[in-house]
Image: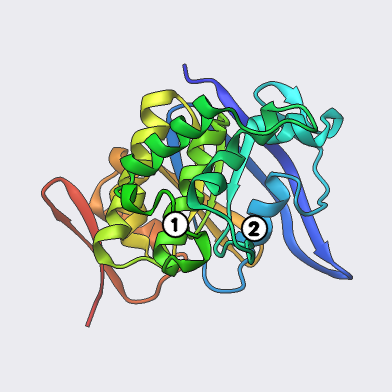
Amino acid sequence: METVLLEIKDMSVSYGKREVIKHCDISLREGKLTALLGLNGSGKTTMLRASCGLLRGRSAVWRVCGEDAYKMNEKRKAQLISYVPQKNTIIYSISTTDVVAMGFNPYLNFFSTPSKGQKEEARGVIRELGLEEKADADFMSLSEGQKQLIILARAMVQNAPVMLFDEPDSALDFLNHHLILSKIRELIHREGKCGLITLHDPNFALEYCDEILILKNGRVRDSFMPGLLSAGEVQRKMSLLYDKIEILEHNEKFVLVKSI
């Protein structure tokens, strides 16, 4: 039986008087990549940010790797949870390798900096993502897609058991869509981490994720593992979000198409 690495019960998040997330439960297990699907404005980003503590929410239970997250300091949270946002917030000149090496910060003392060995490890992750020639480049000179890959590399170096991704493929071209999602899935499966990822395209969720959560009007309406269901069952569940669709099966994979 897989270990639950992130457990949240009865999560609610409000902006002023407007409740955006309404009494949601999340349970993420080791070795599983879970997609969070929802239409624009459904609260996907809000749920991710509240799950790692970047937004203040209300939850009856918030446990990470068996520990009460409410009792953790920020350093401990960063050791256990990594977060890859839709857009990076770095707006100053810094080398690509130094950006990736920031992933070591949760393990360093306040005045310490990454060691030579840690920077070499950062370079290795950059190489793994196919950007070796950019290792010494100024981060600000990279394309938006390259920047997103480097932010993923930083999360890989951070090595937290719980990984949250907010549309990490949003700035990528077709080939890099598949590169980043395959790397995320491989990392989660190989190292026994858990991942929660928001995706704009439901077909990427069907192809790369072990489980899918359906978020609608601030509530988790359903959760399912596509690999255990028939095409008809997947279609019924996806129809909670998408009108006039059909689920086809090709090479043992499901594909969502709009029906005529």
Counting from the top left corner in percent of width and height, residue 200 is at 43, 66
Where does label 2 land, which residue? Answer: 219
In this view of the protein, can residue 239 be seen by the observer? no
Disc 1 is placed on an element classified as loop
Please tell me how crowded label 1 is: few (under 14), some (14-19), or many (20+) other residues with Cα within 10 Å. some
For badge 1, the amino acid type reads Ala
Farthest residue toward the right?
A: 17
Task: Choose the circle earlier in sequence order: 2 or 1.
Answer: 1
Q: Quadrant of residue 86?
A: bottom right
> Position of 77 compared to 114: left or right?
right
Nearer-the-camera pick, 46 or 38: 46
- Residue drawn 68% across and 27% down? 107
Counting from the top left corner in percent of width and height, residue 33 is at 43, 40
For badge 2, the amino acid type reads Arg
Q: Quadrant of residue 161?
A: top right
Where does label 1 land, which residue? Answer: 137
Counting from the top left corner in percent of width and height, residue 36 is at 51, 54
Nearer to us: label 2 or label 1: 1
Give how far apart the Cα atoms at labels 2 and 1 are. 43 Å
- Residue drawn 76% across and 33% down? 75
Counting from the top left corner in percent of width and height, residue 66 is at 69, 21
> Position of 15 compared to 194: left or right?
right
